[in-house]
Image (cartoon, rainbow, N blue to C red):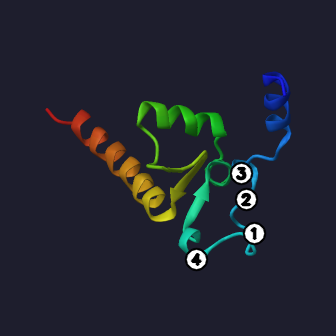
Amino acid sequence: MPLLAIGASFAMEPSMSTQPLSNPDQRSPLLSGMYTRQQLAAELGFTCDTLCRWEARQIGPPCTRIGRRVLYRRDAVEAWILEQENARANRARRGNRR
C-alpha cells in the first residue's frame, strides 16, 4: 500500500481528541476530574489554539498528555486561575509603591 494511501486512511479515522470525555459511557472514574482541550477551551471562552500556544509558552494551565490526547485536571485549572488572580493583585500593589 502506498504511503499516501496509508496517510489518507489514517486522516479519515476519528481522532481520540475530538471525542468528549463527558459522555458517561466513555468516562472512567480515573478521568472523571479531567477536561479535554476542547472542553476547557469552551469552558474558559478561548480557542483550542490559544491553549496550545499557552502550553508551548508554559504560561497556561498545567496539562497532561496521554498519547495524543491533552487533558487538564480540574483542580490544577482552578489553582491556575487563582494564581492568575493573585499575580494580577500583586502586580497592582507593586505599581503603587513609593
Q: Which mark is residue 29?
A: 4
Q: Residue at x 71, y 51 (%)?
A: 16
Q: Nearer the viewer, mark 1 or mark 3?
A: 3
Q: Quadrant of residue 26?
A: bottom right
Q: What separation in Å lies between label 1 and label 3 (alpha carbons)?
A: 13 Å
Q: Is residue 25 found left or right of 65 in the rendered image?
A: right
Coordinates of residue 84 in the picture (x, y in percent) = 40, 47
Task: Tell me the distance, in whole angstroms, between the alpha carbons under discs 4 and 2.
Answer: 15 Å
For marks 4 and 3, give the CA distance.
18 Å
Marks 1 & 3, CB-CB < 8 Å contact: no
**With 38 as the anchor, is 58 left or right in this view?**
left
Quarter that holds the C terminus: top left
As shown in the figure, which amino acid type bears the numbered disc 4?
Pro
- Where does label 1 land, which residue? 23
Q: Which residue is mark 2?
A: 20
Query: Which residue position holds label 3?
Result: 16
Residue drawn at the location 56% of the way across and 63% of the way down: 34
Under circle 4, the secondary element is: helix
